[in-house]
Image: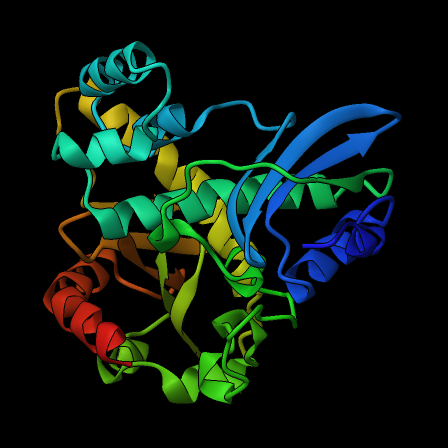
Amino acid sequence: MGDDLIEFIDGQPFYDALKNAVEIRWSGILRAVKDSEQVGVVVMRDGHIAWAVSNVQTEKFGSFLERIGMVPKEKLDEVIKKYRSLGKSKKLGALLEEAGLISHATLRECLKAHVRAALFSLMQDPGISLEARHGEMIIDASLVFLLSEVLPDSEDEGPGASSDDETSSEEDSGPDDRKSNAPRALTALSAMPGYQYSFVAEMSGVIHALHVGDSVQVDAASIVHQILEWLSIACRNSPEIKMGRVRFTFLDCDEGSIYIRMIDDDNRSFLVVACDRNARMGVVMHKISETAETIGKETEQN
């Protein structure tokens, strides 16, 4: 990578610089700077994002995995101790995999969620710019992301990405598109009295399927992040009260109820169903339990 291309990154607004780095297939470290102080870092390999961290983030990756219930604290402490004893020469995620505490697929989704949170926090401050620096880091080629994966609203899908409509993010689709592409079992939930909407999402925040009832307006992209905050608290607290992993939870409100059902063994994907006060709780919970497995399989196939 020639230094003459650094001008497309250095001093540019954060998001513009990031898109330019993707376009020129940048490899190295991007320092997020505000008022001459470093406030974050983005690591890239050939235009793909391998890691990002922001000073705004209040927890490290290991703590994040513990909080969402992916790795028990005592096991995490053991792996972190080994990680430090190796002089950080091996990635924490790789050590967690070796210990059998997390699958590679789940590790990738959790890493994507952590990177996305860092990038979003950096994008919120217009005073932050990027500075490009050459540098080598240990990078697992299977744990790098397109810009569109970690910033779903991005129009730039990165090097080698397809431009077909099938590869566009669910968050770019309108409600009618999501309704027509929803799994049949998800659509079937709409027959329940009081039904408003339902969707399937991952702990990373990516929405895979959405169905919206007639005359209902839903900003699913916004709702899913609120759901994740609530769900992460439940996942963190359930082991502490000796109840194991969260499988099903609901919130009863003045205007209706929201139900959440984990739909895979790794607690990676979940189903959300929202109903108004006309719904009957017993009917909804029974219907969700009855169809959750089918919805999960149909979503994977779509």
Q: Where is the N terminus found, in terms of image quarters?
A: bottom right
Residue at figure coordinates x 21%, y 77% from the top left: 298
Whole-percent x and y of residue 160?
51, 75
Left or right: residue 171 versus residue 290 is: right
Can residue 201 be seen in the rendering of this structure?
yes
Residue drawn at x 55%, y 58% as measured from the top left: 46
Along the viewing direction, whichever of 33 and 275 lies nearer the viewer: 33
Image quadrant in which you'd find residue 118:
top right
Residue 214 in view here:
no
- For the C terminus, the image quarter is bottom left
Residue 66: where, in percent of width, then height?
31, 26
Judging depth in this view, the residue of 42 and 185 nearest the camera is 42
Q: Name the residue rendered at 25%, 52% in the picture.
A: 105
**Residue 261: percent from left, percent from top:** 24, 54
**155 sits to left or right of 16:** left
Query: Which of the 4 image quarters holds residue 135?
Result: top right
| Relative horizontal placement of residue 53, taking residue 131 as reference (left or right) | left
